[in-house]
Image (cartoon, helix red, strand yellow):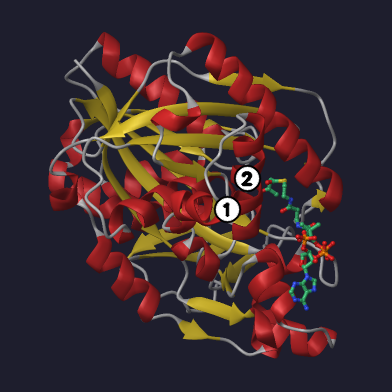
Amino acid sequence: MSVGIDEISFYTSNYFLDLKNLATVQEIDAEKYYQGIGQEKMGMPAPDEDVVTMAANAALPLIERVGTDAISTVMFATETGIDQSKSAGVYVHRLLGLTPNCRVVELKQACYSATAAIQMGCALVARQPNQKVLVIASDVARYDLDTSGEATQGCGAVAMLITANPRLVELDPEVGNHTEDVMDFWRPNYRSTALVDGKYSTKIYLKSLKYAWEHFREVSSLAFSDMQHFCYHLPFTRMAQKAHKHLARVNKSNLTPELLDRQVEDTLLYNRIIGNSYTASMYIGLASLLENCKHNLAGKRVGFFSYGSGCVAEFFSGKVVAGYEKYLHGDKHQLMLAARSEVSYDEYLKLYNDIDPVDGGEHVKAEGTTGRFRLVGISHHKREYISC
Ligand code: CAA
């Protein structure tokens, strides 16, 4: 029996800022963003949108297909926690109408935790093959204004069903890990924006890739040349291109730079216009590969590098299942992305500054999302969600 990803769906806000407008305000060349970091647009959440509403929107198509009774566990991965105690997934559980017998838990380790959720989901399914585990990763990437991280903001959620005999990707059981206590990127509880040592974070990312890969090689018989495509964690798309060349060097690969670029290029298309979505980003990259690759991927092996600052990294692999193309949500994703509205720099600032109140009063959220779920208000420190 194989175990892995049976279905994948993602969601992002209906607002975006084109980075050329940010570059104009900063009086720098927009090519620094378009080419230098490989980002064009960044998603900005609407005032009535957060990790819960994005997650419910991402998961809805999966639940509509399998039914609300089918899910035994929801694992919610995020580093944009809305509560220190209650899992954001419990709100999603209600919004989606899941059964009281379905367990829900939230996982955190920066951008890595969705991968932990998937591995744990696979373990649950291996023990009870009739189970379906819903893994959701949902985040809003926020940095201080006028910092180097500002252009790498974004938002999005991805939902994946983990099942036995999956229809999209069979995951191999062997994984390589690297964990190290470092301060490259972090967000103390009292801050709404992340702190980052940008250049250092990119170095630690590459170092972790090498070590996670070396561990993977110790436990797996698969070599670099056994994988035809690679999905990397995507803080910005240039990071994946650099990482892939780094991994090729580690493996003394003789593939040309053009061929190496081709092994990652289809994974980058959505992130380039959504921005960083932390836990969700690598899996939105997987959706991008499956939905946009012109060649039939059936039987092809994909290498995955998941990185969470702080840091925990994991290299793992999976094989694309024959017939996968019949079970994708590509058309829906393309329509959603095409229907987004561009905001001006001033509108971006307004959205950026619309942070949650902390005074316990009654606060109504302005309408803005075109999604199926809304955060309508925060009153007496309680978040109120509705489905539209
Ligand atoms: N035309 C084309 N390219 C240009 C250019 C122009 N006019 N101007 C600059 N560039 C290029 C630069 O040469 C550089 O390319 P190289 O990296 O290949 O040298 C690139 O654009 C970026 O320029 P800078 O290095 O000057 O950019 P910066 O210092 O202002 O910011 C950054 C880069 C540090 C990554 C910043 O975006 C940042 O802090 N981001 C947030 C942290 C982050 O994403 N880290 C990634 C690893 S950690 C992680 O992955 C977890 C996570 O999700 C956060």
Q: Residue at x 31, y 51 (%)?
A: 290
Q: Is residue 236 visible?
A: no
* Contact? badges 1 and 2 (CB < 8 Å): yes
As drawn, the label of residue 257 is: 1
Q: Secondary structure at mark 1?
A: helix
Nearest the eye: 43 or 294: 294
Spot occupied by residue 165 in the image (x, y as percentages of width and height): 18, 25
Amino acid beneath label 1: Pro
Q: Secondary structure at mark 2?
A: helix
Amino acid beneath label 2: Lys
Residue 109's place in the image compared with 342, above or below, is above
Looking at marks 1 and 2 on the same chain, the residue that comes earlier in the sequence is marked by: 2
Residue 46's place in the image compared with 88, above or below, is below
Spot occupied by residue 83 in the image (x, y as percentages of width and height): 62, 42
> Quadrant location of ligand 1?
bottom right
Q: Residue at x 77, y 84 (%)?
A: 29
Task: Give the quarter of the image for residue 303.
Answer: top left
Task: Give the quarter of the image for residue 189.
Answer: top right
Q: Badge 2, how many Cα within 10 Å: few under 14, some, many 20+?
A: some
Q: Residue at x 62, y 67 (%)?
A: 38
Residue 317's place in the image compared with 199, above or below, is above
Spot occupied by residue 40 in the image (x, y as percentages of width and height): 59, 75
Task: Tell me how many marks there are.
Answer: 2
Spot occupied by residue 298 in the image (x, y as percentages of width and height): 21, 41
Q: Badge 1, how many Cα within 10 Å: few under 14, some, many 20+?
A: few
